[in-house]
Amino acid sequence: MTAARGLALVAILALPLAAWGRAASPADARQRSRALDAEVSGLTRSAEVNHALVELGQLAERRSQEPRVRQLGARVASQAQQANTELRQLMTRRGLSFPDGMGADDESRVADVKEQHGAALDRGFLDESDSLLREELGVAHQLARQAPDPDVRRWAAGAQR
């Protein structure tokens, strides 16, 4: 091996080592921090939405006069409980606190539906659960594409189905 080739080989091998030893720039650290904050915020919001969906589903199951709405309410509540079981496990593994209930806006929305009766209750359940499910899908889509943690991306991809 000639000296020039040897130096070229050393230079090629040294480049990755130099990059490896280099610390992340402050901009990289800020970007990573924002991504982690968005991930935690998304997971928390998903759990809050699921708490609201459980409450709405159980309400529809108990109080709707329409059998199909009662069945849908039971299914919505069951699926939201399952999603929160998975979320609780995921968040616990990551050392994150799991929210105990729905967000304040969700509480107000659920309270409005609770005040309704008959067809108005059914309509309120259908409208609010549709809105919350759409929000949940949006959050899951965002997490599936941008969450730093691969376990979170996998969970979110499954939540979109």
Image (cartoon, helix red, strand yellow):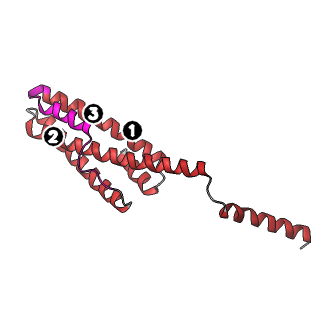
In this view, 129 is above or below 28: above
Residue at image location 10% in from the left, 34% down from the top: 64
What is the residue that sits farthest to the top in this orientation? 120
Residue 130: mark: 3
Q: Are marks 2 and 1 in contact (CB under 8 Å)?
A: no
- At mark 1, the secondary structure is helix
Residue 157 is situated, as x and y percent measured from the top left of the image, at: 41, 48
Which image quarter: residue 14? bottom right
**Which residue type carries mark 2?**
Gln
Residue 65 is situated, as x and y percent measured from the top left of the image, at: 7, 32
Residue 124 is situated, as x and y percent measured from the top left of the image, at: 18, 29
Which image quarter: residue 113? top left
Q: Quadrant of the C terminus?
A: top left
In this view, 140 is above or below 25: above
Residue at the disc numbered 2: 71
In this view, 4 is above or below 74: below
Left or right side of 145 for 59: left
Q: Looking at the image, tell me whether mark 2 or mark 1 is earlier in sequence order.
A: 2
